[in-house]
Amino acid sequence: MKKLNRAAAAALLVTVLSACTGGGQDRPNSADQLSSDPLTAVRSAADITGRTGSVRATTELITESAEKKAVFNGTGGYDYVKRIGRLEVDVPPGAATTGKITEVVLPGTVYLQNSGAKIPEGKWVRLDVRQLPDGNLVSSGATDPASAAGALRGAQHAELVGTEQVGGVELKHYRGTLDLAKAADATGGRGADGLRMAAQTFTVKEVPYEVWLDDRGRLHKVVEHFTFAGVAGSTAAKDQVKVVSTLSLAAFGEPVEAAEPAAADIYSMKASPSPK
């Protein structure tokens, strides 16, 4: 089963690698407001956003290597009360699989359904994010909303760039670098598993980010730049894959439909008979 789990994890990661290498009403907390200190504002964004109850999410993941570039786009939402999210991700041409990836994320666990995969229709593959070298920050074509926001808890530097109007809302724009290992420590629990795995795997440890926050400190948009080796263990520049992950949030507090798949709908890979 360990071999099968590794195979499933590897197959998931190949989706990205092959493309680039060969709740109810918004419940505001009266105490929530944007800090005047940039670093405090950025580090607090995940917790403040979580207190809104739920969000609608739009994602974009751009992967680029020396040979190829691919763009994954997704839509969905995240329920911070139930700690579950659901995303629908479009697979670009040239990836190892086709169709659309549906992803249900919980702390430490991801369920995947792929219309182009060779598994029974309507079935899901369940993975522990600790099986994935990147902790599911990039391998399924999207950085899930909880992880993208949680990474900001590890912000080490932050500077205020300015104020911008986005969709009629005045937002403060910040930039800096973050440490995924420190973000994992600040997040804690199973929700930290993906951040910790990525911290061990990604080759650039000081992750550049940009973030846009409203006057309550809520996260509206975050862009994070990840780098990992497309060839395992290689530090050569030609083997590095650069990833730009963008998460945009809106409709704070609006209900999100996301449910954990039933046990009967989980697809279990069967081992091939051992040769005599």
Image (cartoon, rainbow, N blue to C red):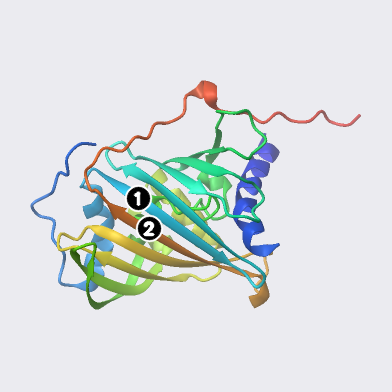
Quadrant assignment for the N terminus: top right
Above/below status of 14 relative to 27: below
Q: Give percent across and percent down for residue 139.
A: 55, 52
User: In the rendered structure, are the residues bearing label 2 and label 1 in contact, judged by CB atoms less than 8 Å apart?
Assistant: yes
The numbered mark at residue 57 is: 1
**The one of 83 and 253 positioned closer to us in this rendering:** 253
Q: Is residue 67 left or right of residue 217?
A: right
Q: From this viewpoint, is residue 236 visible? A: no
What is the CA distance from the residue labelled 2 to the residue labelled 1?
A: 7 Å
In terms of secondary structure, where does tag 2 sit? strand
For label 2, the residue is: 247
Label 1 sits on what residue type?
A: Ala
Q: Is residue 273 left or right of residue 134?
A: right
Q: Quadrant of residue 234?
A: bottom right
Q: Amino acid at mark 2?
A: Leu
Q: How many marks?
A: 2
Residue pictured at 33% horizontal, 40% vertical? 83
In the image, is residue 63 above or below residue 265? below
